[in-house]
Image (cartoon, rainbow, N blue to C red):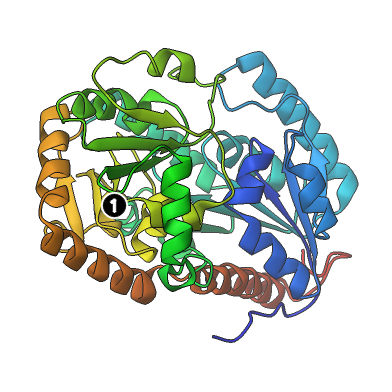
Amino acid sequence: MTRPTLTRPLRVAHLTTVDSSLRFLLHPQLTAIRDAGGDAIGISAPGPWVEGLEAEGIRHLALPSSTRGMDVRADLRTAYELWRLLRREGIDVLHTHNPKPGIYGRVLGRLARVPVVVNTIHGLYATEDDSRLKRFFVYTVETLASRFSDAELVQNAEDLDLMTRLRVFQQRKLRLLGNGVDLARFDPGRVTPTSRAETRADVGANENDIVIGMVGRLVAEKGYPELLAAMSQLDDRYLLVCVGPEDPEKSDGLRIDDLSRGEGARVRFLGQRLDMPELYAAMDVFVLPSHREGFPRAAMEAAAMGLPVIATDIRGCRQVVEDGVNGLLVPVASPADLAEAIARISQDEELRLAMGRRSAERARLEFDERRVVATVIETYNEVIQTKTTSDGRRSRHGIE
């Protein structure tokens, strides 16, 4: 696949709440801008990942008041901080990412006269099981905010279908983005049997243990309470390894100390880790019992590493797991169904290995992040070309 190119050098800023999103979710898009000769900028709250990003040539602009949680006063301060940055920096493309920055970022980007505003829908924050009132609120807010953007990149095909059927979003702006991972990094062939054995030993698993893996922030929405309840229904052959940081700013944030008190479950909480390929290789089955997802990266990484995936039957997870083919889909918030699915796959080695092979095949065909990056840059180029052609004139940024 050829490297995507910009029609001309651009100053592109990705706006998120926290720096970890820039490092772990948007890093390929930022480095692609840098490699294409543009100025790659991340805008978020300051944090421990900023130094590494800047060492790679990605400039960071800090929003000191930005938080993941709901705090009206902090959000208003963040909006003001962003407004000042946008007025000062002369950015060509502002790329926002929901939930909160996708709302105020699109509006302020347009009001600050940023030439191009693009938003990524990482998953609509209302599911088919939510109340009509919540769905109405979420869809209305997203519809209004989308009026301020030039393009809406939708990760999930089911979200795109819904947005098309609602007929309230401007259809010309909608583009299917999908999602992807680094298939060169998440390649099971790069992890040796010795490395697998060493990693399993490091997490406390012996040769006969069945290692169940989970990756995600420690919030209830990810399904941790149900997963721990499911593990309590399984015997001592099973070891659960959870990778992900605490998220105390979220209203449903969970603490490792509290979760570790669960009786009858063998669980290891590892926190944030960077050696993910090795950790996936040490697992036998991957689970993601989330209540809501856009297009889950962890599940894609696990699939690429050749693991069968058990996930909830929701939008996003259905894009990674084909039920009965490369894993199983279970109802949301059902520990009994989750435990049954884990036991079914774990106790049938032939089924587990076959599903793992199909996961790797699916990843190679559908989860290549290079295609995602190419779509993003093509969108920038197309919007710039359209606006330049329609206006017939250029501003100091190249378009107006």
Q: Quadrant of residue 21?
A: top right
Question: Which quadrant: the C terminus?
Answer: bottom right
Q: Of 379 and 43, which appears nearest the observer?
A: 43
Q: Position of residue 347 (x, y in %)?
A: 11, 49
Q: Is residue 352 left or right of residue 362?
A: left
Q: Is residue 369 above or below residue 308?
A: below
Q: Is residue 317 left or right of residue 140?
A: left
Disc 1 residue type (three-letter): Asp
Q: Report the residue marked by disc 1.
A: 284
Taking the spot 80% from the left edge, 30% from the top edge, the residue there is 81
Q: Position of residue 91 (x, y in %)?
A: 81, 55
Q: Is residue 74 above or below residue 358?
A: above
Q: Is residue 36 left or right of residue 245?
A: right
Q: Is residue 397 above or below residue 170?
A: below
Q: Position of residue 101 (x, y in %)?
A: 61, 38
Question: Which quadrant: the N terminus?
Answer: bottom right
Question: Helix, strand, or loop for circle 1?
Answer: loop
Taking the spot 59% from the left edge, 58% from the top edge, the residue there is 150
Asked whether residue 127 is in view, the answer is: no
